[in-house]
Image: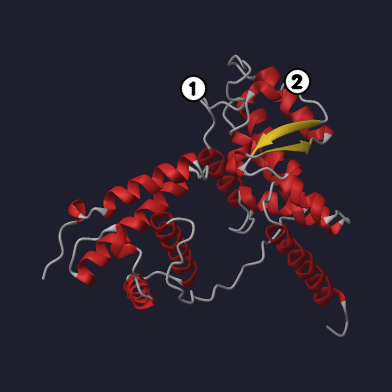
């Protein structure tokens, strides 16, 4: 018995409703919503073939562990690695919980083991060299000042690249701190180093576009909001010129901010607030980073290592 086409599955509407829920109630980014809903569509299509019937809410809430194992097996056969398979399973569970309500209990299956990577920090001198090299390569002085200010915000204040490019001119004039809106639309207060403040002031002085409150602070060459992808490209070009490893990315500058603060005795709870982590467990990974750095020093310096 052939399965009905995906458009005929009643569950397609449930996937659309889930997208609304993720956007309105969970405050997920558009990128995350697209990825989650694509997973829901894949699951629906698979179940239509696997079960040979239209996929309804009743079917989704009556799935067995074997159904999800079969789905994951198919996805693994398509080349999905452990980390991607774990994310796929997490999205499937979220969709099934949405369909069945908060009291729903999706089939319990063990996900693939994922080795959690330890972020590799960029040395302070390399982080500053990267920021200045990206600025030196800019086509115009105001763009050079912009790139320097953005990259110093990532390393000097621990911002995510999207948080930096999402800043508005409402933070002007820059004082000792700025308010940053992070994941889940949560706002945190971040201290600003004098060097970072000066870089922002230089950019504001040179920027040819009016910076009205509520408008984007960092502008592209044509006056629109600066794209995070443009920042990533500038960093990629600078690291090639400087001979830095591929792991030198905008996000690595944020890792470096966290690692260097922790290495100088910063409290883990304070670091959690500065980074905007919802869970302390997200911050605790930096203790492993610091331990890894100590081991590197030990191996390189100790005569018996």
Pointer 1: what residue?
222
Q: In which quarter of the image is residue 119?
A: bottom right
Q: Quadrant of residue 215?
A: top right
58 relative to 266 in the view: left or right: left
Q: From this view, report whether residue 204 is shown above or below residue 54.
A: above
Foreground pick, 70 / 118: 70
Instruction: Please report the residue visible at 35 percent of the width from the left and 76 percent of the height from the top.
Output: 73
Image x and y of residue 52, in percent: 18, 69
Q: Residue 89 carries which label?
A: none
242 relative to 94 in the view: left or right: right
Q: Quadrant of residue 208?
A: top right
SS type, badge 1: loop
SS type, badge 2: loop
Looking at the image, is mark 2 or mark 1 nearer the viewer?
Answer: 2
39 relative to 296 in the view: left or right: left
Q: From this view, report whether residue 39 is shown above or below residue 174.
A: below
Q: Can residue 59 be seen in the rendering of this structure?
A: yes
- Category of crowding for the residue at label 2, using alpha-carbon neighbours closer than 10 angstroms: few (below 14), some (14–19), many (at least 20): few
Q: Can residue 137 be seen in the rendering of this structure?
A: no
Instruction: Please report the residue visible at 67 percent of the width from the left and 51 percent of the height from the top.
Output: 278
Q: From this view, report whether residue 302 is shown above or below residue 244.
A: below
Pointer 2: what residue?
173
Instruction: Please report the residue visible at 35 percent of the width from the left and 54 percent of the height from the top.
Output: 38
| CA–CA distance in space, label 2 to label 1 | 23 Å
């Amino acid at each position: 018995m052939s399965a009905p086409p995906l458009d005929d599955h009643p569950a397609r509407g449930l996937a659309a409703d889930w997208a609304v829920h993720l956007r309105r109630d969970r405050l997920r980014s558009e990128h995350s919503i697209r990825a989650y809903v694509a997973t829901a569509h894949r699951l629906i299509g698979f179940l239509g073939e696997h079960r040979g019937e239209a996929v309804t809410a009743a079917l989704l809430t009556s799935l067995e562990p074997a159904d999800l194992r079969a789905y994951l097996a198919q996805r693994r056969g398509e080349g999905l690695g452990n980390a991607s398979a774990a994310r796929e399973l997490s999205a499937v569970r979220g969709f099934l919980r949405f369909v069945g309500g908060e009291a729903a209990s999706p089939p319990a299956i063990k996900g693939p083991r994922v080795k959690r990577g330890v972020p590799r920090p960029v040395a302070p001198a390399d982080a500053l060299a990267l920021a200045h090299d990206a600025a030196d390569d800019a086509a115009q002085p105001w763009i050079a000042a912009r790139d320097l200010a953005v990259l110093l915000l990532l390393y000097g204040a621990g911002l995510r690249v999207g948080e930096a490019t999402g800043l508005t001119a409402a933070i002007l004039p820059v004082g000792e701190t700025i308010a940053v809106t992070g994941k889940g639309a949560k706002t945190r207060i971040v201290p600003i180093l004098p060097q970072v403040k000066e870089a922002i002031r230089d950019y504001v002085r040179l920027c040819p576009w009016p910076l009205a409150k509520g408008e984007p602070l960092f502008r592209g060459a044509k006056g629109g909001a600066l794209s995070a992808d443009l920042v990533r490209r500038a960093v990629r070009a600078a690291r090639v010129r400087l001979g830095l490893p591929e792991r030198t990315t905008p996000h690595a500058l944020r890792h470096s901010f966290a690692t260097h603060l922790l290495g100088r005795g910063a409290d883990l709870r304070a670091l959690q607030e500065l980074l905007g982590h919802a869970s302390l467990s997200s911050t605790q990974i930096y203790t492993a980073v610091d331990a890894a750095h100590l081991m590197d020093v030990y191996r390189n310096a100790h005569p018996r290592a």
